[in-house]
Image (spheres, rainbow, N blue to C red):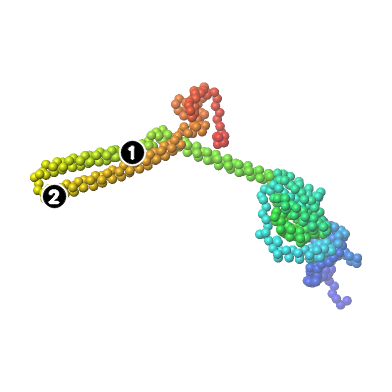
Amino acid sequence: MSRRVVPVSTLIRYLKQSMDSDPVLHGVMIEGEISNFRRPYSGHWYFSLKDEKASLACVMFASSNRKVAFSPKSGDKVILKGDVSVYEPEGRMQMIATAMQPSGIGDLYIQLEALKKKLNAEGLFRPEHKKPLKRFPMDIALVTGNNTAAREDVLITLKKRWPAARLTEYPCPVQGAEAAGKIIQSLLQADTGNHDVILLVRGGGSLEDLWCFNDEQLARTIYAMNTPVVTGVGHETDTTIADYVSDLRANTPTGAVEAAVSDAAEVMNHIRHLNGRMQYSLSQRLRGERARYEKFAGSQVFSHPEKLMQTHVIHLQYLDEKLHRYHVTIYENKAELSLLLQRFRQIIAGKKETLSAGLYDDRLRLIQAVRRQVYEESGSLSRLRQQLLHSAEKSIMTYRRDLASSVSKLDSLSPLKVLERGYSIVMKDGHTVSRTDEISNDDLISIRISDGLINAVVTSKEEMNGREREDI
């Protein structure tokens, strides 16, 4: 023997390294029938793939089999993709599968990807075309198969989460060659029903079972709908063309309901929270207004309201006296001018005969000039008198308006106005009572209301806690 002897492990390791480095054995796709399928606790899948002439051991780890869209079993014919290698402890050749699909649907996948690429290029999947959903839909349409598990899931979930909504059903087949056309008819009928949202749902199944939801005409119908459409087709790993083009995609029929409607319990909790905030805000506002009222009630305006107008009254009296002095001055000046005019006339009449004609004419012109000046001064005084009267009347009107406005404000702040709104003032021995510990049983109290006084005897009293006082 010319060759050297090597351990078994060395040979197995050599074979493994050779197969792992061979690109032909990476990403290889094989077709066969599953046998001896096992699912241990680890989550990995162990099985064999066989045909009429051979059998190959296979393993699919949990990280990869989670992506498989169906549940395989012994006897299923499938297509595997993966790497061929050697399992060293047993010296056994095996395939480490990374993907699995049912045999015979490769063409369907090709068609699906081609249609998806076409519709995406046309913009049917773009987010800006998605219609917004109402937060609280009250009229819901359901498009699904009649007497199906998906329908029951929707009814149970809707009754639990949002029982106030009205549900209208549009039953149609959701599987088979004619299903796509029937679904389109139901959707178009639902779109004319003035609903808030349409639920298009179906339970899980194989690619062939869900193929009607990959119909191009159905996708274009959903895109053109006026009513928002929420889809829940298949399981979490199932995604159809209808899901891509709908306004919102959920992973299951139950998920479609949860995505379309609010949770009534959460809404009620939110309402209670808002109600609490509103009550707190109102109590704070009431506390502030009460403090403001007490501040005004203790001011001198209420105890001595005449002081509010005292300054204005004094100023008006001053203006009135000033106007009276102007009248007296004008009257005295007018009397003096009349007296002077009379004296001039007497002088002229007494000396008229002794004056020469020229001197008489000069004196006459002088008198006429003085008379004109007197008239001018008299007119000027008259105008000044009118201006003074007008200014005084304007000032008096302004002060009267200010006085009326102040009286109106004073009246609005009057404690009697507060009493007219149903409030009252409780007094004991002439003092205001604001706390229950200021009075005792059998005390005589007086209750001041808007139109009179009520005398009463205290028979009992009850204290309120802080929250009760805020609620009043």
166 displayed left or right of 89: left
Separation of disc 1 and disc 2 at Cα? 52 Å
Q: In this view, does 7 lie above or below 40?
A: below
Q: In this view, does 405 lie above or below 129?
A: above
Going 88% across and 64% down the picture, which residue do you hit?
Answer: 50
Task: Report the number of discs.
Answer: 2
270 vs 131, nearest the viewer: 131
Image disc number at residue 289: none
149 vs 77, nearest the viewer: 149
Question: Quarter holding the N terminus?
Answer: bottom right
Going 89% across and 65% down the picture, which residue do you hit?
Answer: 51
Q: Quadrant of residue 187?
A: bottom right
Going 14% across and 41% down the picture, which residue do you hit?
Answer: 346
337 displayed left or right of 293: left
131 displayed left or right of 46: left
Q: Is residue 380 visible?
A: yes
- Residue 46: x and y in percent read 83, 60
1 vs 2, front mark: 2
Category of crowding for the residue at label 1, using alpha-carbon neighbours closer than 10 angstroms: few (below 14), some (14–19), many (at least 20): some
Q: Is residue 80 visible?
A: no
- Residue 427: x and y in percent read 47, 27
Tell me the SS state at disc 2: helix
Residue type pointed to by label 1? Leu
Residue type pointed to by label 2? Asp
Q: Earlier in the sequence, mark 1 or mark 2?
A: 1
Identify the residue under disc 2.
Answer: 362
Identify the residue under disc 1.
Answer: 316
